[in-house]
Image (tube, rainbow, N blue to C red):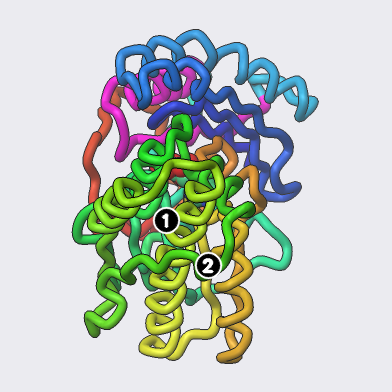
Amino acid sequence: MLVLGIETSCDETGIALYDTQRGLLSHTLYSQIAMHREYGGVVPELASRDHIRRALPLITQALAAAGCELRQVDAIAYTQGPGLAGALLVGASIGAAMSFALNIPALGIHHLEGHLLSPLLSTPAPVFPFIALLVSGGHTQLMQVDAVGHYRLLGETVDDAAGEAFDKTAKLLGLGYPGGAALSQLARQGRPGQFKLPRPMLNSGDLNFSFSGLKTAVLTLLNKQENSEQICADIALAFQDAVVEVLTEKSLAALTQSGLKQLVVAGGVGANAQLRRTLSEKAAAQGATAFYPELEFCTDNGAMIAFAGAMRLQAMPESARQPARSFNVHARWNLEMLETPEAD
Ligand code: KG4
Ligand code: ZN
């Protein structure tokens, strides 16, 4: 089955072709970051308009790169939520229109399910069940993943997401938007142990997180220091140390509590090198293995949507795979509320 994936939930237009026999055939991406940078964050209306401009040419490119024709596509998977309503509507309407015109099934996919399953695109891939640490710009969650559609929330942030904390702290340090990658780059020049920031909720006894206090701690620190590049790098490192330690300790606790031995890390913050290194080392020390998506599939992309769509479509009875007659999007959508694909 050849599935065309369409991702337009935020500021990246991602398209991919995934074949259930041959794997990922192609994927194309256009990032709007340069456009939003001027405004210091994503401007929803500009994001929607840009998705309209990019989506069809990217679909043409993805088909050409895969050596496929549109009529060979068997099904469409598009991100149905959560995300920016207008941006989601672009992908959903294109997906539904193509489904109707080609008379092939269309399926709305939960963006976070895409992230959760994205490490399965890599080799070696984890096998169910596993623990997933989902760390993106909008979410920080620990989930137990038993199978496609079987997700149990173990803990989550009570305020800012880890990626949001990276972005806000980067802004305080005078770095551009989005700041996660820039902050981790700056932290490479930081002197270890120069500053120590709090580890929020490290000993809370549950698997929840809190990151909003960290940016205040960074601000307080910045106000007390002369503002040199070296000091900023030291603070970036201290911030990254704090986030990485909390994410690592809670992930290890989730492994211990569940008795599972595989940890999957997904979402944009999963691109962070220090987080990857620390998680891998500490997981190995307790006999567990950490799995990561390829770097290009950590942040938003169409491949994870095509893949999640393929997994769900395969698990569905033939009669349930229907062309779209209408469509809607969910700007907010709880992952645990997802139906399991085998339901008929
Ligand atoms: O998953 P994603 O692309 O989009 C959402 O669904 O939110 O994640 C984007 C987030 C941003 O907050 C960005 O700053 C962060 O991931 N990020 C990083 C790194 N690369 C991206 N955070 C820390 N270190 C990185 N290397
Ligand atoms: Zn995402």
> Which image quarter: residue 286?
bottom right
Seen at 61% across and 12% down, the residue is 57
Q: Is mark 1 within 8 Å of ligand 1?
A: yes
Name the residue that disc number 2 marks: 264
Seen at 38% across and 73% down, the residue is 144
Seen at 51% across and 45% down, the residue is 183
Amino acid type for the residue under numbered disc 1: Val
Q: Position of residue 106 (x, y in %)?
A: 43, 32
Nearest to the observer: residue 205 or residue 131: 205
Q: Is residue 47 above or below residue 305?
A: above
**Res. 310 in view:** no
Q: Position of residue 63 (x, y in %)?
A: 70, 23
For mark 2, give the secondary structure.
Answer: strand
Query: Callout 2: few (<14), some (14-19), or many (20+) C-alpha neighbours within 10 Å?
Result: many
Name the residue that disc number 1 marks: 135
Q: Is residue 161 above or below residue 36?
A: below
Nearest to the observer: residue 38 or residue 323: 38
